[in-house]
Structure formats: C-alpha cells, structure tokens
Amino acid sequence: MASYDRRTGGIPRPPKAGDTWWYAAVAGEAADSFSTRVRTRTRRACLGAVLLLTLVYAGLVLTATGRRWGDAAVTGRRADTRIAVFLRDHPSLAGAATLSLVLACVLLVGLGVLRKRYALTGAAVGAVAVALAVAGLLQRYAPRPRVPDAAGALAPSGFPSATATLAFGIAFALALVVPRRSRELVVGAATLWAVVLGAYSVAAGDHRPGDVIAAALLALAVQCGLIALLARRGKVRPGTRRGTTARGLPATLPLALLAAGGLAAGFLLLGDTLGLPATAPYDPDELRLAHRCGQALAAGVGAAAGLALLVLVRHVDLAGGPASYRLGGPLIEDSGAPDQGELVGPFTENHDHEIS
C-alpha cells in the first residue's frame, strides 16, 4: 500500500514493507485515494470560485449601488493626480502590456514543448481558451441594465475583463507546464504580473475593478476544473514535500502580503465609498477614495486566487500518471533494489525462494 493511501474511516495503520495493491483491495482502501482527495478539493474550489463570481456579478453589475461604485472607481483615476501624471508621462505602457501578453503566451507554449509535455500544454492552452470563451459569452449574453454612456449610446459591457482573464489564465495555466520544484516561484511571479496588468487596465479606464475581480475568479474556476478532471482520470500523483517552499518565497511572500493588504484595505475603504450620491456632482476626494478602494480589492482578490491555486496543488505532481505500487520485504531484498519504473512483485528470480 502506498504511503499516500489512507483508510476512509477508523484508525489508519502505518504502512509496512510488503504492502501491495492486493492488500489495498482486501483492506478496502482505494488505490486512487490520493487522486480522489485532489479531485474533491479542486472541485470544491471550482464551485467556490463560481459562487464568488456570481456574487460579484450580482453585487457590482445588477445593483445600482454596485454600478455607481464601479463608475466612481473608474472616474476617480482622473482625481488621483499621481496616477494621471504617471500614465500621461508613459504612453508606451499600453503597448508594453500587449507585448507582455504575447510573450506570456509564447512562454506558456514554449515551456510545455521544451519539457515535452504536449498533452499538458494542450490542456493548459485549452483552459485559457475556455476562460476567454466564457468571458466573451458573459460579456455578450449576461443580463445587465442597459446603461447609456455620455453620448447616449449603450456602453459596451466589460464584465469580466478579457485582458485580465487572459493574464490570469496564463499565470494559472503555468502550473501545468513548469517543473514542480519551480511551480510556486513561476506561478507566483506570473500572478503578480497579472495583478499589475489588471491594475493598469483600471487606471487607464479600460475596465472597472469588478471586471478584474471577475476575471481572476473565472480563471481560477476553469483551472481548478481542469485539475479536477486530470485527477479524475488518474493523471496526478504525490510530489515531494521538501525543497519547494523556500524556493518559491521570493514570489509567494509578496503575493501573500498583497492579498492580505489589498483585501484588508479594500474592505475598510468600501464602507466609505458605497455611500456616494445617486447623481453628480461628486466630491473629488470620494472619487479618489473609490478608485483606490477598487484597486486594492482587485489586487487582493487576484493575489488570493493565485495563492489558493498554489495551496491546492502544493503537494501534487501534475507531470504524469499516478505512482505505481511497489513491494518490499525480505522476499525481494536479496534481488537488489529495482530500477526506476521497474515493476516488482512478491516473487523474484532468486531461486532460493521457491514455493514448495
């Protein structure tokens, strides 16, 4: 019996040499229990992300207060002079953001091809495509009030943000193609990049904070659903529990601080910005506060989504199928240690151990 298979009830017995798949069958312990646990928790995470996405949609799109708060957060970028001056002095940021998205797509595919993980690369690219497709369907068909813009035409919907969906989708999909020992570092750094890209889209007035929040939750839901599907097909196995946390700290520590600080600051400021009057004029200080509140919430949710994914797959190896059961004990000790990937059984070719 492999060390990661446990009883579903009762007191677990420590594994001993000689435990095999047939012992698991006799004892009633499922051989794919690790895959079952991975599938269960990723499926729950997927459903939780969908539920949060629904709540964000209902609160920030369907209610007048939520729409007014989102509009104030976008308008407040003009009241925040530091952001306005920075964007005015750096007009090339729009091109740099587009270029970074292209390079991220190339990185995702290139890493998978170089590591010869063709199936996982296809699955990762497919997850990004599914997230973008769902974002497009929500933008086009999700019910919402018909709000006209200043010119009288109906304002196009940006919920969720396609740009942020692509950025977070690529960041989370990297978990499938990078080596497990570098997963926390690479995925954490990519999530920080996606958060910065979402903050830029809000500061530039392209999207509301709710659009970026929804994009992060949508990308997390699709990625968790994909991992649950891989676990259902037995394509996951336990990974080593040492040597990965310290290597990923340069990215995961800032990500954790950003998640905690962003969510705390955003919820503290949210109570002061939801009481905006129903009609203009608005106080510039309130608009500036709403913009900072929206940026904090978007950054906090995006960072928390990345951390949630890393926690879900922390001890999971996504690079191959489940680990095969191996036998041990006195019957095979004399025959030497088996080679990597070699299937061994209770009887060896040592003729000193024959059944009479």
Image: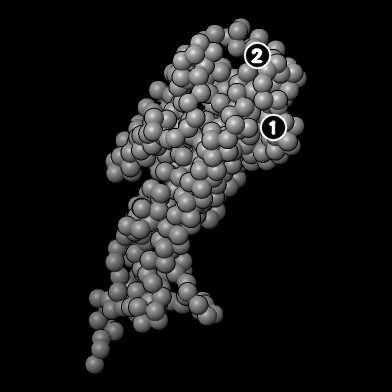
For residue 347, which numbered disc appears in the image?
none
Q: Quadrant of residue 91?
A: top right
Left or right for 321, reference 92: left
Query: Residues at badges 2 and 1 in contact (C-beta under 8 Å)?
Result: no
Q: Which amino acid does the dot numbered 2 rest on?
A: Arg
Locate residue 252: give its quadrant. top right
Q: Nearer the viewer, residue 238 or 140?
A: 140
Residue 275 screen position, x and y as percent:
72, 31
Disc 1 element: loop
Label 2: how many residues lie within 10 Å, few (<14), some (14-19) or many (20+)?
A: some
Q: Quadrant of the C terminus?
A: bottom left
Q: Amino acid at mark 1?
A: Leu
Q: Residue at x 42, y 58 (%)?
A: 39
**Residue holding disc 2:** 78
Residue drawn at x 52%, y 38% as measured from the top left? 57
Q: Which residue is mark 1?
A: 274
Question: Residue 88: which quarter of the image?
Answer: top right
In this rendering, the answer to whether 271 lies above or below 235 is: above
Q: Does residue 280 sit above or below 183 in this rendering?
A: above
Q: Can you give x and y, in whole percent of width and height, for residue 197 in the image? A: 53, 25
- The earlier-in-sequence mark between 2 and 1 is 2
Q: Is residue 237 above or below residue 262?
A: below
